[in-house]
Amino acid sequence: MRTGRILHRGRVRRVELREGRLYDEAGEAHDPDRAAFLLPFEPRTIFGLALNYRGHAGELGLEEPKEPVLFLKPPASLLPHRAPVERPQGVAYLHYECELAVVIGRAGRRIPERAAMDHVLGYTVANDVTVRDFVGNLFRPPVKAKGWDTFTPLGPYLVSADEVADPHALALRAYVNGELRQEGRTDQMLFSIPEIVAYLSRFLTLEPYDVILTGTPRGLSHVRAGDVMRMEVEAVGVLENPVVEESL
Ligand code: MG
């Protein structure tokens, strides 16, 4: 099942995507090309993993981590499909990061790897927008680099886990203005979804609608005002957001 939320005549409508149309709870059909998308659900805590793809650390001149490198994305950074990402004034290097986002469905603490997938409700697409200027080192949480308002586009749909046969066998592609800039596969993750769920829940309780951004493959590049970023995760969706100048 692919579910989301749209704004229609001033009201939030929960919708399901079926055969290319969005159906709301009243049975009314909406055109996904014209719908005003909201976040597909209300995320709780948003966890991110840095350097979780083979080859990505090398691109940044860093070593591959020995255990998951974690950070948090603030709620105010969340942004729905098609809404504009604001490029901060005066920064040198703003980039996208195409990521598979895991949505937790069942709470748990000290979840063993073998049971981890039972706690996954589904998946969506994330763009972990980052100002590289503000990334210091592995041990400095990238709050300013990744935490600006509009820096976490998410959606368009929550795709239930049963629709994704193997989340570790998906292609990821990022396009800017239609040009392929980043390409990878989720089998390049250093730490798999069960390993991440087990690692996190060893010290904190995961709750429904917690979101885990599982990292990005190599292939970062600049985006500027006027660009359109298109993040594709096979079997999960296509998340598109334009870039605009920061409004002051
Ligand atoms: Mg990232």
Image (spheres, helix red, strand yellow):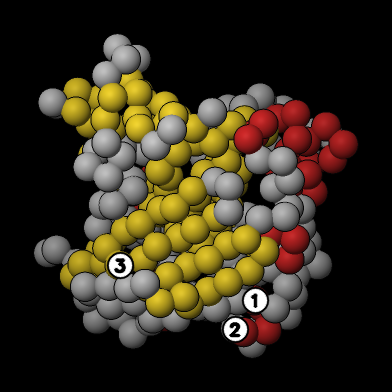
User: What kind of residue is marked 1?
Assistant: His
Pointer 3: residues within 10 angstroms few (<14), some, or many (20+)?
Answer: many
Q: What is the quadrant of residue 13 in the picture?
A: top left
Question: Could you tell which of marks 2 and 3 lies nearer the N-terminus?
Answer: 2
For badge 2, the amino acid type reads Leu
* Residue at the top extreme of this rendering: 26
Give the class, few, some or many, for how many residues have Cα within 10 Å of label 1's Cα (few <14, many ≥20): many
Near mark 2 (Cα within 10 A), the count class, few <14, some 14-19 or many ≥20, is few
Instruction: Give the position of the N terminus as an image quadrant.
Output: top right
For the point 27% across and 72% down, the residue is 227
Is residue 15 among what the camera can see? yes
In the depicted view, which residue is nearer to us: 182 or 26?
26
What is the three-letter code of the residue carrying label 3?
Val
Q: Which mark is residue 215?
A: none
Q: Are marks 3 and 1 in contact (CB under 8 Å)?
A: no
Q: Which mark is residue 56?
A: 1
Q: Are marks 2 and 3 in contact (CB under 8 Å)?
A: no
Return the x and y of residue 247 as percentages of the image width and height: 14, 63
Q: Position of residue 129 (x, y in %)?
A: 42, 64
Tag 2 near tag 1, CB within 8 Å: yes
**Secondary structure at numbered mark 3:** strand
Quote the CA–CA distance across marks 2 and 1.
Answer: 7 Å
Determine which residue is flagged by label 2. 60
Q: CA distance from mark 2 to mark 3?
A: 24 Å
User: Please, what secondary structure does the residue beneath circle 2 have?
Assistant: loop
Horizontal side of 200 relative to 8 (left or right) equals: right
> Can you tell which mark lies on residue 228?
3
Q: Residue 35 location, x and y as percent?
A: 24, 38
